[in-house]
Amino acid sequence: MAENRRKSLGILIGLLIFFLGMFAVYGLGVYNDSEQYITMHIHREPLYPLFLAFFRVILGENVGLIVAAVVQNILAAFSIFFLIEYLQKKFSLNLFGELVLLVLELMPHLITRYVSALHIFMENSIMSEALCIPLFNFFILFTLRMMFEDKKADIVWSLVLAFLLSMTRGQMMATILMWMVVLGIKLIFEKRYKKLFLPVLAVVCVFGLRSLSVHTYNYFVTGYFMGNTYGQVNTLTNVIYACDKEDGEVFEEGTQERIFFDQFYEQADSLGYNYKYAGNTFAEKAEHLEACHDDLKFQVIEANMSAYYFGLGQVDYYMQSSMSDEMAGKMLVKLLPQCFGQWVCNYFMLCCYGFIRSIAVVHPLINWVALGIYLAAAGAAVWMLWKHRKSQAACMMGLAFLFIVANVCATSLTIMCLSRYMIYGFSLFYMAFFLLFMEWLRSREKKS
C-alpha cells in the first residue's frame, strides 16, 4: 500500500514538473483570440472569460493572466493524474501500463506544441482550450465511473461537467447529449426502462439552464439579455460557400435578404471563396473550403452586415451582432434547401478531415492509416464484446467513438475541424485501444 502511494505521488509530481516546466520554458501565450476572452466578448462562452476575470480582478491584468495560466497547468496535471489512476485500478495495470496511459494523455499537449501549425502549448495559452481540456478529462473520468460503477454521484458529476464544458466551448454541448446517450444505454442494459425519461428530462433542463446562464452573463457584461452571437453567421458561411448564383432567387427582389445574398455571392465569387474554385480531388476541395471559411465570414459576410446595420444609425456593436445573427438565421432557412446537395458534400469533407485529426494528422498517406486504425479499433471492440460481453475496454472504446462522432459532426456544422478542436478525443481513443490490447493479452493468458 505504501509503495502504491509513493508511485502515485511520483506520477503526480512528475506531471506537475512537466506542466509547470513547460510554462517556465515557454511562458504565457497570448494570441489573436485571447483578447476576446479577456474583454468578455459577446461571441465567447462565459466560463473561461469569468475564469480569467477572477484572477485579473484580484491580482491585476498582467499578474492575473500569469497566475491563470499556472492554474491551468496545475488543473491539467491533476485531471490527468486522477483519470489514469482510476483506469490503472479499474484495469489492474502495472506501472508500465499506467505510464503508457500517461504518455497518451500528454500526447495532445506535445502534438499541438511541436507538430500542429500553431505550435502552442495549450495550457500556457489564454484560450478556452486550456480550461476545456482539464474539464474534459474530469468529464471522461466521471462518465466512465457512471458506466462502470453504480453511484448516483457519478451521474450527477458527469452531467455537471458536461454543463461546464458547454459553458466553455459551444461545440462541447455535444457532451450533454453524449451523457444522455450513455446513461440511456446503461438503463436499457439494466432493464430500468421506466427511468429512461429521466436523462431526457435532465438534458432539457440543462440546456435551459445553459441558455439562461449565457443570457444572464451577457446582460451583466453588455447590458443586453441575449445569447452568444455569430453562431448562425458561422453556419451561413458554409452555406454561402455551397451556393450557386441562381440560389438567391429564393429571396424576393428588393428584400434585404436578396441584397445581402447578391453582395455575398458576387464578392465570394470574385475572391474565389466558392466551391467551384476548389479543384478536383477530395483533398483540394476540403483544403479550399477550410482555407476560405474565415476569409468568407469576416471579409464578406460580416463586413457587409456590419456596414448595413451600423449604417442604420443608433446601433451599437451588440445590437449589430444580434441583428446579423438573426438575419443569418432567416437566410439559412430559405437558402439551405436550395444548395443542400453541395452543402452535404462539403459537410462530409469537413467531417472526414475532423475524423482524421481526432486521431492523427491530415496527410495523403496518413489519411489511409487513420482509416485502418479506426477499422482495427472497431473490430477489436466488437471482437472483445463477442468474446467477453462485459468487456470494459470495449465499452470505453464505444465512449471514444461516441465522443469523436459527436464532436466532429457538431463542429463541422459551423466551422472547420481544426486540430485544436479535435484533439480532445485523441487520448481517449488510444487509451481505449491500449486497454483493449491489454484485455486481449489477459484473455490469452487465462486460456493458456
Image (cartoon, helix red, strand yellow):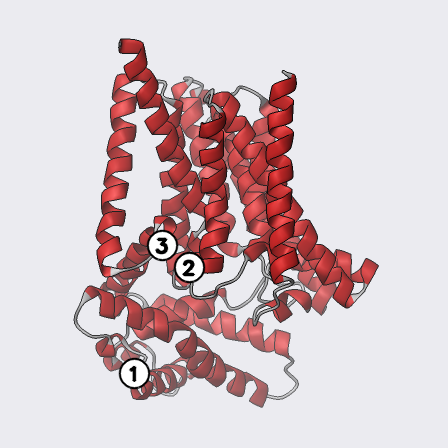
Taking depth in this image into account, of 275 and 135 the one nearest to the observer is: 135
- In the image, 41: left or right of 276? right
User: Which residue is identified by label 1?
Assistant: 272
The quarter in which the C terminus is drawn is top left
Of callouts 1 and 2, the N-terminal one: 2
Residue placed farthest to the right in the image? 58
Q: Nearer the viewer, mark 3 or mark 2?
A: 2
- In the image, 372: left or right of 311? left
Q: In 3D space, how far apart are the residues under numbered discs 3 and 2 (Cα atoms)?
A: 12 Å
Taking depth in this image into account, of 102 and 59 the one nearest to the observer is: 102
Q: Position of residue 202 (x, y in %)?
A: 55, 36
For the point 46% across and 47% down, the residue is 107
Q: Can you say whether 312 is above or below 155 in the image?
A: below
Q: Position of residue 248 (x, y in %)?
A: 30, 79
For the point 52% across and 22% down, the residue is 89
- In the image, 439: left or right of 44? left
**What amino acid is at disc 1?**
Gly
**Helix, strand or loop under label 1:** loop
**What amino acid is at disc 2?**
Val
**What amino acid is at disc 3?**
Arg
- In the image, 267: left or right of 369? right
Callout 3–callout 2 Cβ contact below 8 Å: no
Disc number placed over residue 115 in the picture, else none: 2
User: Which residue is identified by label 3?
Assistant: 357
Q: Position of residue 68 (x, y in %)?
A: 70, 56
**Helix, strand or loop under label 2:** loop
